[in-house]
Amino acid sequence: MEKVYNLNELAIMTGFTTRTLRSYLSQGLLRGEKIDGMWQFTPEELDRFFNEPFVKEGLRIKRNAAVFDFLADTAKKSNRICVVLDLPVSDEEGAECSAFFCAAMMRAKDASFSYSRDRGMSRVILSGAEDQVTELLRNYYRQG
């Protein structure tokens, strides 16, 4: 069965609020299916959404801001880490990667995640508490 994503997972993945995503739904930029009152999105629908020029630029800005904000914060009180993974993987492997991190982020307390896919490359940005990000990476590479 193909992995489907809900609105909260898409918000975690993109950094867009659920309100913004609902606006994109009403504008037709994002397409999905409402099942039992919950929006669901296939990897193909997400690929199309991620490749919309307006959305692509917004995602690029969000990703760059996440890294810039991490670098600009010089008052960190504990060990923090920011990791950018560029993974040249198939669409199926990219979907598995995003599914893994979406599920893991539901349990993370002090870490953030963004995901994008463009021209055969999946990009994952993780930042947060050093121990949590390190554990996320360890678990990702263990399961693969």
Image: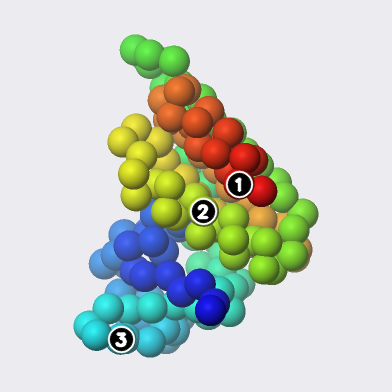
Q: Is residue 18 left or right of residue 91?
A: left
Residue behind mark 3: 35
Nearest the viewer among 107 and 112 is 107
Report crowding for label 1: few under 14, some 14 to 19, many 20 or more residues within 10 A (C-alpha).
few
Q: Amino acid at mark 1?
A: Gln
**Of the residues under marks 2 and 1, which one precedes in the sequence?**
2
Residue visible at 70% across and 46% down in the picture: 86
The relative height of residue 37 versus residue 144 in the rendered view (above or below) is below
The relative height of residue 85 versus residue 101 in the rendered view (above or below) is above
Residue behind mark 1: 143
Residue visible at 43% across and 29% down in the picture: 132
Gap in Å between the C-alphas at discs 1 and 3? 30 Å
Q: Give yes or no for contact between labels 2 and 1 (Cβ–Cβ under 8 Å).
A: yes
Checking the image for residue 100, the label placed there is 2
- Examine the rendering and report whether any part of residue 141 can be seen: yes
Report crowding for label 3: few under 14, some 14 to 19, many 20 or more residues within 10 A (C-alpha).
few
Q: Residue furthest left?
A: 37
Residue visible at 77% across and 54% down in the picture: 88
Q: Is residue 6 left or right of residue 121?
A: left
Nearest the viewer among 15 and 98 is 98
The relative height of residue 36 versus residue 119 in the rendered view (above or below) is below
Q: Secondary structure at mark 1?
A: helix
Checking the image for residue 113, the label placed there is none
Say which of marks 2 and 1 sits in front.
1
